[in-house]
Amino acid sequence: MKAAEILITTTEKIPGKEYEIIGEVFGLSTQSKNMISDMGAGLKSIVGGEIKAYTKMSHTARDKALERLRQEASDLNADAVVMMRFDSGSMANDMQSVVAYGTAVRFI
């Protein structure tokens, strides 16, 4: 199955589907911004409001983590990933790390 076709759900059960568990799968991404974006974010923090460069960085990290999760599940010939969760954290002041993880399953 192509990685893009892997069903991902945060639930334990998929209605109408029976499956066998393959195992844990992970997707990890760490993103950073360039110095100019960091300077802009620093200025924005003085006046308050959303720092769009960091919001975009977080979205990019999340999307890349999901892409890698799907690829790992596809490599195991999975049909879906159940109980998917995200975890994230910052490294230094300008890096965002996101992990997507769950259980790869194969429909029976």
Image (spheres, rainbow, N blue to C red):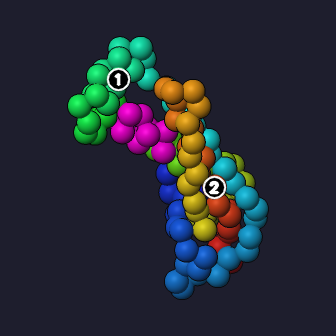
User: Residue 5: horizontal and vertical position, in percent?
Assistant: 50, 57
Residue 71 visible, this orientation: no
Q: Main secondary structure of the magenta part?
A: helix
- Mark 1 = which residue? 42
- Nearest to the eye among marks 2 and 1: give it: 1
The quarter in which the N terminus is drawn is: bottom right
Q: Could you classify mark 2 by the number of other residues whose Cα lies within 10 Å: few (under 14), some (14-19), or many (20 or more)? A: many
For the residue pair 85 and 2, the one nearer the viewer reads as 85
Q: Quadrant of residue 56?
A: top left
Residue 69 in the image, given as x and y percentages of width and height: 60, 49
Mark linked to residue 96: none
Which residue matches tag 2? Answer: 101
Instruction: Indicate left or right for 14 with 46 as reference.
Output: right
Badge 2 element: strand
Magenta-tinted stretch: 54-62
Does residue 42 sit above or below 20 in this rendering? Answer: above
